[in-house]
């Protein structure tokens, strides 16, 4: 034994307080809060009189307005788009956060409207296409396209950016 004391098992009050601290500190979705609470119950155990109800607690936080999945989706998709990620990658992040399709409508519209700007930011950050310092070799081209695809951009968009001549600005895509 290392002499380290284990925290006591959780009860209703401790779980509620832990959830409140989490939503006060982090922007989160219902799904992420639920995963956090379940993990904490598993780690520390349950000592409450009634069975643990993390679903009920998460639903109560949604009803109280502490958690807004639609707002979280818009915020998270905007932040990821500003980092240069594409629609597919952003969609994966939102699904991982437990955001349902009905809460993603506004975020999806935002993603679609900012797709070209996100690709531009990604190309600028990675020095690809018009932001490259010199001509690109076939092996580098493959790697650059793969990077675009991992970032969630479509193959056609990746090819267009990677094949752009260095130093020449690109016109926005007409869709």
Image (cartoon, rainbow, N blue to C red):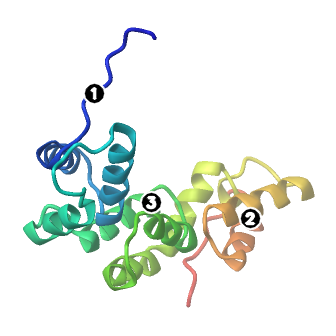
**Horizontally, is 160 left or right of 135 in the view?**
left
Q: Residue at x 38, y 58 (%)?
A: 79
Disc 1 designates what residue? 7
Label 1 or label 3, whichever comes before in sequence order: 1
Residue 144 spot, x, y in % from top left: 75, 57
Q: Residue at x 17, y 56 (%)?
A: 50
Marks 3 and 2, how far apart in space? Answer: 21 Å
How packed is label 1: few (under 14 Cα within 10 Å), some, or many (20 or more)? few
Disc 2 designates what residue? 162
Disc 3 designates what residue? 80
Label 2 or label 1, whichever comes before in sequence order: 1
Q: Is residue 109 above or below residue 122?
A: below
How packed is label 2: few (under 14 Cα within 10 Å), some, or many (20 or more)? many
**Horizontally, is 89 left or right of 155 in the view?**
left
Residue 13 spot, x, y in % from top left: 11, 46
Secondary element at image label 3: helix
**Circle 3 or circle 2, nearest the eye:** 3
- Residue 157 visible: yes
């Amino acid at each position: 034994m290392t002499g380290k004391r284990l925290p006591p098992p959780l009860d209703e009050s401790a779980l509620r307080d832990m959830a409140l601290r989490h939503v006060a500190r982090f922007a989160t979705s219902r799904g992420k809060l639920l995963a956090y609470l379940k993990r904490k119950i598993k780690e520390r155990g349950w000592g409450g009189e009634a069975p643990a109800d993390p679903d009920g607690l998460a639903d109560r936080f949604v009803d109280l307005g502490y958690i807004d999945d639609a707002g979280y989706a818009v915020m998270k998709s905007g932040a990821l788009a500003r980092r240069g990620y594409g629609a597919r990658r952003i969609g994966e992040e939102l699904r991982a956060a437990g955001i349902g399709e009905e809460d993603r409508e506004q975020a999806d519209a935002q993603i679609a409207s900012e797709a070209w700007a996100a690709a531009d930011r990604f190309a600028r950050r990675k020095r690809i296409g018009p932001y490259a310092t010199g001509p690109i070799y076939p092996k580098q081209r493959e790697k650059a396209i793969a990077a675009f695809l991992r970032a969630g951009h479509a193959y056609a968009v990746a090819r267009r950016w990677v094949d752009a001549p260095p130093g020449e600005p690109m016109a926005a895509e007409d869709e």
